[in-house]
Structures are given as C-alpha cells and as structure tokens.
Image (cartoon, rainbow, N blue to C red):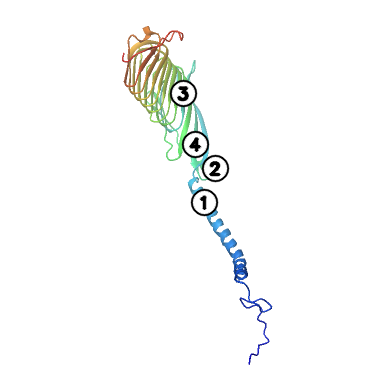
Amino acid sequence: MGFRSGEDHSGERGTSPAGAPVPPEAERGRERRGRGPWILLLAVVVLLALLITAAVLIWRSFGDSLSGTSVARDSIDSGPSPRIRLTNGPGQIRIEGVKNSNSVQYEVTKHAQASDPATAKKRASEVPIDLSRDNSAFVLETDGGRGAGADYVLQVPSGSSVDVTSEAGDVEATGLSGSVAVQADAGDVTVKDVGGPVKIKSPKGDVDLSNMRTDTGQANLEVGSGDVTLQDLVVGTLETSVEAGDVTLSGRFSGGGRVSVQTGSINAKLPPEDTRELTLEARIGQVTREDGRSKDEPKKSGKGG
C-alpha cells in the first residue's frame, strides 16, 4: 500500500537528512575524514618506532666510544748514562734527554674506552705499567689491549741509551748522546739532536732524522711505506732503505753509505762534496741533486750514485 515507517532514516548511507540521495563525492569525503585521525596516529607510532630503533643502533655503535684517562708519574734514580727499554702498545712516546740529570722521570697518560665516563676512567686506571730491571737496563712495559693504551713522556739523563718498541703511535727521541733504537710498527718516528748510533725500523710511517753527531757511529734506517727526511748528519756510515716513499737530504752531510729507494724519489739538497762517498739509488723514481749552499745556482739532476 506504500505506507512508510515513522523511523528517522536520515543517517542512512547515501541519503541526506531530508531523504535525498548523497552524491558519491560527498560520501567519499566523509569516509576520508573518518580515516584521517587514524592514519595520523599510525604515522606518529611508526615514526616513534623508527626513532627508537635509530637511537638503539647509535648507542650500540658508540657505546664504547667514550674515553677516560688516568695519569701516573714516577722518578727512578738511574745515574748519568742508563739503558732504558720501553715497550708500548697503542700510544704516543716522547723521550727527552736532560743534561746533568741522574734520574728517569716518566709521566704515563693511560687511556681507555667504555660506554660511560666513569667506567672508561676506571678501565684507564687499570692499564698496567710494568717496571723492572734487566741486568743494567730499566724496562718499562705497557700493553693496553682492546680499546686501551698509554702515552709516555720520559725525561732521562742526556747520556742515556734507549730502545723503543711501539705497536701504534708516533715516537720522538731528542737530546741523547747514547744509542737510539726504535721499532715503530705504525707511526711516525722523529730522532734529533743525538750523538750516538741510530737504528730505526718503521714499516708504516714517516721518519725524520736530524742533527746527528757521531763521526764513527752508524745510522741504519729501514722504512716500509713512508717518507724520510735527513738533515745535518755527521756519521760514520748511513744506510737507508725505503720500499715506497720519498727521501730528502738537506743541510750538511759527513760520512759515507747508501740511500736506496724501491719506489719513490730522492732529492739531495747538499753540497756536491758532501755526497762523494754517499750512493743514491732509486729503482723506480728519480734522483735529484741540488747544491745546498746556494739557491741561485741552477739545479743539477741525475740518476744513480
């Protein structure tokens, strides 16, 4: 018969409150508005999860990157010309000769890494420093291990003889009249103002030897990959072997010997008479000679000795 119920059907989908059909575009807009808050909430949750994951990864990667240090100092009565042997793991080494001194003074800055400053400092304080005597030699040894090491500063009598073995780090020795021996597995080596024989082994690192004064002593340098600087040397003999790197000689030179480079160049900025007994050889590279007494004179170059 066509009777209608008295119920309100204005909320039915697809009709307006007046019963007229709702256009499809309006219906889709209503659905999008209903989903909007949920999509925004989901995006916020995903973003927070990504931030937390990134923070955890960063914390794990840098968890042991905070450094701590601990300093130890001591002095040892040694007499005017002691023998000192130092073996170190990762760390820098500086040895300075002091005139009229009769003691070995050392300062060791031990360093370590951990996830927080307090733990790093504790680990640094636990890095061992072993001091002993081997016949007439004073022996200092430090092996830092994983993430730890020590930097040494020694003030020793100028008459000291030193023997240094370094795992990683630069080594510097100055102002000594005794013998100097350095083996640095990775790091630069500087030896200057010395009056005794010098022996340097440096597989990876530059070597600088200057102001050496010993008419009869020998300077023996074995370098793997690194440049070599030789300046103002008075020696009995100089033996320098370089696998890959450049060699520069300057100032004055007195003595004889050989400088040999497998791959690299040699630049001798010395007066010609200084190199009469010194052979210069570059297997793959050039040997250049300059008269070190005058920069105005034309350069001379050549290969071989």
Q: For the residue marked with disc 2, what is the amino acid?
A: Pro
CB-based contact (under 8 Å), mark 3 and mark 1 = no
Confirm whether residue 208 shows in the render.
yes
Residue 215: assigned label: none
Residue shown at 52% from the left, 44% from the top:
119
Upstream in sequence: badge 3 or badge 1: 1
Q: For the residue marked with disc 1, what is the amino acid?
A: Ala
Task: Tell me the distance, in whole angstroms, between the alpha carbons under discs 3 and 1.
Answer: 45 Å
Upstream in sequence: badge 3 or badge 4: 3
Task: Tell me the distance, in whole angstroms, between the alpha carbons under discs 3 and 4.
Answer: 19 Å
As helix, strand or loop, the secondary structure at mark 3 comes to strand
Q: Please name whichever residue, 99 or 194, is drawn nearer the observer in this view of the structure.
A: 194
Q: Where is residue 23 in the image (x, y as percent from the top left)?
A: 62, 72
Task: Please identify the quarter of the rendering in which residue 230 is found.
Answer: top left
Q: As drawn, is 18 to the left or to the right of 263?
A: right
Upstream in sequence: badge 3 or badge 2: 3
Residue 177 vertical position relative to residue 45 in the rendered view, above or below: above
CB-based contact (under 8 Å), mark 1 and mark 2 = no
Q: For the residue marked with disc 4, what is the amino acid?
A: His
Upstream in sequence: badge 4 or badge 2: 4
Task: Tell me the distance, in whole angstroms, between the alpha carbons under discs 3 and 2.
Answer: 30 Å
Task: Please identify the quarter of the rendering in which residue 80 is found.
Answer: top left
As helix, strand or loop, the secondary structure at mark 1 comes to helix
Confirm whether residue 82 shows in the render.
no
Task: Please identify the quarter of the rendering in which residue 216 is found.
Answer: top left
- Residue underneath mark 3: 95
Residue 116 vertical position relative to residue 219 in the rendered view, above or below: below
- Residue underneath mark 4: 111
- Residue underneath mark 2: 117
- Residue underneath mark 1: 54
Q: Please name whichever residue, 46 or 24, is drawn nearer the observer in this view of the structure.
A: 24
